[in-house]
């Protein structure tokens, strides 16, 4: 009973919102007013953040490595595009959920293959699934549009009220709200007993099974949930760009996702979001300096992060803000001393 109560207490404490978390989301919302001319790139960051969040659920919490996560992104993108193109589901929010469910079904079906392997085997299986779907999308070009992609996608107003504008303002707020809602759900999941059991499986699957954790069922469930999130991210891509082409299944998209998590870290949800911001900012910076070689500089940054260590880099970045906070706190304490003496 004591052990169970300790676990419950730890879960409750971890689930509490911190000031830094509130500040993060407040800053994300403030960006809409601080950078009104950058809605398109900010929407791209939000989509990438949601996509990275989906991979973090299986990599950071369950220890499942995937090089083919773009398979679910692509399924979600094409599902949303086909639903809108043929007028099957005209309402974007309903189409978004439907596309996520299609990706979740694919995730559930393929999860039985993924959980049978470990490490390198899982990498190859996930990569093979993505490449297979890309080949099928190219083969059935009469449905997917082939190399040209889906043409003539027109998105209806969100909830019948908010029209997608050419500047991307509606798309940004729409994507940010979707990200926030799904983040709340993911946060609830990882701080629940289910999330704690995932950590146990990640750390030692044999020990987790020995204490009664249904390892396979947990892995199937979280893999399906991650596929749902990735499908939502893909659907957001189609809805906010009115485009769906074969590159949504590409290996490069999965590789970029891994880079995002290397930059931001795994196992604490915000890693994918922070990594998406840094990755896109670096991409914009390097493309403006050397458009042909921006990938080289991204790779160099990755090498530096691996060699130096993410924790040490975070400490360097936060050195000046922490110094200012300490100085401010010291002055405040010094002012408070005479007041207490005077009393």
Image: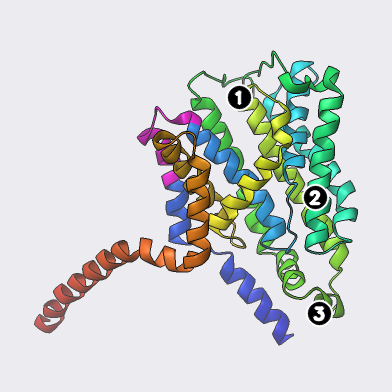
Residue 139 appears in the picture as rendered = yes
* Image coords of residue 65 (percent x, y): 73, 58
- 342 in relation to 18, above or below: below
- Tags 3 and 2 in contact by the CB under 8 Å rule? no
Q: Quadrant of residue 113?
A: bottom right
Q: Please tell me whether mark 2 or mark 1 is closer to you in this view.
A: 2
Q: Which residues are magenta?
A: 27-40
- 1 and 3 marks in contact (CB < 8 Å): no
On the image, the x and y values in percent for residue 110 come to 87, 48
> Is 273 in front, or is 283?
283
The residue at which mark 2 appears reads as: 126
How would you rate the neighbour count of disc 2 (Cα within 10 Å): few for under 14, some for 14-19, many for 20 or more?
many
Give how far across and how far down residue 116 sits, in percent.
89, 61
Instruction: Find the distance from the CA under tag 2 to the CA under tag 1.
Output: 27 Å
Name the foreground residue: 155 vs 160: 155
Considering only vertical position in the picture, is 166 above or below 180?
above
Which residue is tagged 3?
207
Find disc 1 in the rendering and name its residue. 241
Q: Which residue sits at x=65%, y=58%?
A: 188
- Left or right of 13? Residue 218 is right
């Amino acid at each position: 009973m004591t052990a169970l109560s300790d676990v419950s207490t730890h879960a409750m404490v971890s689930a509490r919102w911190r000031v830094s978390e509130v500040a993060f989301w407040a800053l994300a919302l403030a960006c809409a007013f601080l950078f009104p001319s950058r809605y398109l790139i900010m929407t791209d960051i939000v989509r990438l953040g949601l996509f990275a969040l989906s991979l973090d659920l299986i990599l950071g919490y369950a220890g499942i490595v995937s090089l083919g996560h773009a398979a679910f992104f692509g399924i979600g993108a094409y599902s949303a595009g086909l639903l809108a193109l043929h007028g099957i589901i005209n309402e974007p929010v309903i189409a978004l959920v439907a596309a996520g469910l299609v990706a979740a079904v694919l995730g559930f079906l393929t999860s039985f293959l993924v959980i049978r392997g470990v490490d390198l085997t899982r990498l190859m299986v996930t990569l093979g699934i993505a490449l297979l779907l890309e080949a099928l999308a190219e083969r059935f070009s009469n449905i997917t549009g082939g190399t040209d992609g889906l043409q003539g996608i027109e998105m209806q107003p969100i909830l019948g009220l908010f029209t997608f504008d050419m500047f991307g303002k509606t798309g940004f707020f729409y994507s940010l709200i979707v990200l926030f809602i799904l983040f709340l759900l993911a946060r609830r999941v990882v701080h629940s007993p289910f999330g704690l059991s995932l950590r146990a499986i990640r750390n030692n699957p044999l020990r987790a099974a020995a204490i009664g954790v249904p390892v396979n069922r947990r892995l199937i469930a979280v893999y399906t949930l991650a596929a749902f999130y990735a499908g939502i991210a893909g659907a957001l891509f189609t809805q906010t760009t009115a485009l769906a082409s074969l590159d949504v299944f590409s290996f490069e998209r999965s590789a970029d996702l891994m880079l995002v998590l290397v930059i931001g870290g795994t196992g604490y949800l915000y890693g994918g979001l922070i990594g998406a911001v840094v990755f896109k900012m670096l991409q914009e910076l390097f493309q403006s300096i050397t458009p042909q070689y921006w990938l080289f500089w991204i790779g160099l940054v990755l090498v530096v992060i691996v060699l130096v260590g993410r924790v040490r880099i975070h400490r360097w970045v936060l050195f000046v803000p922490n110094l200012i906070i300490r100085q401010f706190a010291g002055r405040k304490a010094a002012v408070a001393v005479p007041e207490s003496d005077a009393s």
